Image (cartoon, rainbow, N blue to C red):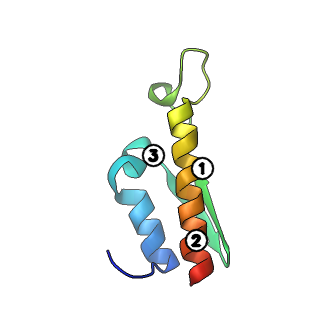
Amino acid sequence: MSGELNPPDLAEAINAKGFMGAAGFRIASITPGNAEVALARREDLLQFFGHFHGGVISTLADSRCRDRRHICAS
């Protein structure tokens, strides 16, 4: 993919590609200037105390910032 992503392209990229798709990240909604990303709680994404692993949380935060940048640029 090159250039700016429009919201449907962004949702497709997040919902189907690489780690984001394997982990189960999904676009819940896209509105002007905002993207809501959801992730279902799964045992394989949790650390031993039963909370999301820090790597999953940081990936969610990192991807959310990227998504917002693409949406606000549109």
The numbered mark at residue 61 is: 1
Q: Is residue 32 visible?
A: yes
Disc assigned to residue 38: none
Q: Is residue 7 above or below residue 62?
A: below
- Residue under the point 58% across and 81% down: 73
The quarter of the picture where residue 48 lies is top right
Residue named by callout 2: 69
Mark 1 near mark 2, Cβ–Cβ under 8 Å?
Answer: no
Disc 3 marks which residue?
24
Residue visible at 67% across and 79% down?
A: 32
Identify which residue, 39 or 52, lies in the foreground. Answer: 52
Q: Residues within 10 Å of mark 2 (few under 14, many from 20)?
A: some
Secondary element under disc 2, as helix, strand or loop, is: helix
* Residue 22 horizontal/vertical position (percent): 37, 44
**How far, Cα to Cα, is label 1 from label 3?**
15 Å
In the image, what residue type sits under mark 1? Ala
Tell me the CA gap for discs 3 and 2.
21 Å
Few, some or many C-alpha atoms within 10 Å of disc 3 (few <14, some 14-19, many ≥20)? some
The x, y position of residue 37, in whole percent, is 59, 56
Badge 1 element: helix
Residue 58 image-quadrant placement: top right
The residue type indicated by label 2 comes to Arg
Q: Residue at x 33, y 51 (%)?
A: 18
In the rendered structure, which disc, 1 or 2, sits on the residue that comes first in sequence?
Answer: 1
Secondary structure beneath label 3: loop
